Image: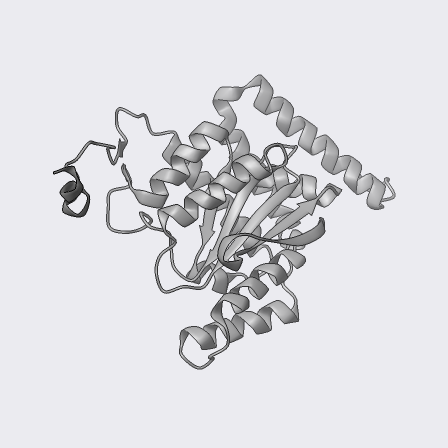
C-alpha cells in the first residue's frame, strides 16, 4: 500500500472494491446478513468515514442552540419555522446531497426533499441499509407539544410510498416529541399507533419512516451523528419487523358498537 500514490481516484477505487466485497458476501451468505452488516459498520467507523460524511457547521449549531432556548422558554420565535431551518441546515451539512427542495401540501405543511447521486451518496445509502436506487430522502419538521399522530405518520408513509415510489426509501420526522406508540411504556412486543404503522409499512414496502426527536436533535451538533442516529433507528425498525406475527401483538382492528352520536341516526 505504501508504494501506491494515493489520490481521490485511488481512494474511491479502494472504497468501491470494499463495497463490492461486502455486497458479494451478502449475496453469497444471506444467513450472515446481520454479522456482515456489523463488520461493515465497524469498518465505516474505524476509518472515520461516517464522521466525514456529516459535519455540522456553525449555522446549524447556532440554530440548535436557539432551539434549546425555545424549549426552555427563552426564545419565542415561530417553532415550526425554527424546526424546518434545523432540518434544512442538517441536510445541507450532509455530504453528497445535490439538491434540497421544498414541497407544500395541506395546511401549508412544508416537506423537504433531499436528493443525491454522488459517490458520497452511495456510501450513505449503503450505511443506512437503503436500496441503491434510493436517491431521495423526504423530511417533515414538527415542533409541536403533542406526539406525532398516526395520521401524520401515515401521511409521510404515503408520500414515501406513492409520490417517490422508485427513488425514496427513507422518510424522516424532525420532531420535538416522539410519535404515538414509541416509548409509551408498552412492551416492545406490542405495537400501537404510529409505531405499528412504521413496522407494517416497512414490512410491506421495504422502506423506512423514522423520527428524530428532542434528544436526537441535540446530538446533531456532533460529527457523524445524523447517520449514526438514522442507522440505529433503521436497525430498530428491521428488528421489530422481524419478530414473528405469532409473537408480535399488533392492536387488533375489531368491530365495535357505533358511538352514540352516530347511533342516534339509526332510529
Identify the image quadrant of the N terminus. Answer: top right
Q: Which residue lies at the image location 59% right of the left edge and 20% below the top edge?
A: 27
Q: Position of residue 128 (x, y in %)?
A: 56, 41
Q: Residue furthest left?
A: 267
Tell me if residue 93 can be seen: no
Q: Residue 255: x percent and y percent? A: 19, 31
Q: Residue furthest bottom?
A: 74
Q: Residue at x 42, y 49 (%)?
A: 152
Most foreground residue, 204 or 59: 204
Q: Nearer the viewer, residue 103 or 83?
A: 103
Image location (x, y in percent) of residue 214: 43, 62
Which of 94/151 is in front?
151
Quarter location, residue 62: bottom right
Residue 132 quadrant: top right
Q: Is residue 179 above or below residue 64?
A: above
Q: 77 or 95, which lies in front?
A: 77
State left or right for residue 222 relative to residue 242: right
On the image, the x and y values in percent for residue 121 come to 69, 43
Q: Is residue 252 above or below residue 213?
A: above
Task: Work out which residue is located at the far top of the displayed protein and give it.
Answer: 28
- Name the residue at 49% across, 61% down: 217
| 18 relative to 36 in the view: left or right | right
Query: Which residue is rendered at x = 55% and y = 35% of the image?
Result: 162
Q: Give left or right: position of 206 versus 116.
A: left
Q: Is residue 55 above or below residue 23?
A: below
Examine the rendering and report whether any part of residue 7 can be seen: yes
Type of colouring: one colour
Q: Quadrant of the C terminus?
A: top left
Number of marks: 0
Amino acid at each position: 500500500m505504501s508504494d501506491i500514490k494515493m489520490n481521490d481516484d485511488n481512494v474511491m477505487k479502494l472504497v468501491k472494491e470494499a463495497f463490492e466485497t461486502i455486497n458479494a458476501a451478502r449475496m453469497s451468505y444471506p444467513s450472515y446478513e446481520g454479522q456482515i452488516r456489523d463488520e461493515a459498520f465497524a469498518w465505516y467507523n474505524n476509518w472515520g468515514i461516517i464522521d466525514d460524511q456529516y459535519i455540522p457547521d456553525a449555522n446549524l449549531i447556532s440554530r440548535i442552540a436557539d432551539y434549546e432556548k425555545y424549549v426552555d422558554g427563552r426564545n419565542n420565535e415561530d417553532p415550526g419555522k425554527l424546526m424546518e431551518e434545523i432540518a434544512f441546515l442538517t441536510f445541507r451539512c450532509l455530504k453528497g446531497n445535490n439538491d434540497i427542495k421544498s414541497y407544500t401540501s395541506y395546511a401549508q405543511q412544508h416537506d423537504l426533499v433531499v436528493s443525491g447521486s454522488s459517490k458520497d451518496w452511495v456510501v450513505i445509502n449503503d450505511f443506512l441499509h437503503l436500496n441503491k436506487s434510493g436517491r431521495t430522502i423526504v423530511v417533515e419538521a414538527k415542533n409541536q407539544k403533542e406526539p406525532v399522530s398516526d395520521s401524520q405518520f401515515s401521511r409521510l408513509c404515503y408520500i414515501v410510498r406513492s409520490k417517490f415510489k422508485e427513488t425514496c426509501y427513507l422518510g424522516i420526522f424532525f420532531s420535538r416529541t416522539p410519535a404515538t406508540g414509541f416509548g409509551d411504556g408498552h412492551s416492545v412486543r406490542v405495537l400501537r399507533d404510529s409505531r405499528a404503522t412504521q413496522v407494517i409499512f416497512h414490512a410491506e414496502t421495504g422502506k423506512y419512516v423514522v423520527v428524530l426527536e428532542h434528544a436526537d436533535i441535540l446530538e446533531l451538533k456532533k460529527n457523524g451523528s445524523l447517520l449514526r442516529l438514522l442507522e440505529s433507528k433503521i436497525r430498530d425498525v428491521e428488528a421489530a419487523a422481524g419478530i414473528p406475527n405469532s409473537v408480535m401483538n399488533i392492536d387488533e382492528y375489531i368491530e365495535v358498537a357505533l358511538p352514540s352520536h352516530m347511533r342516534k341516526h339509526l332510529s
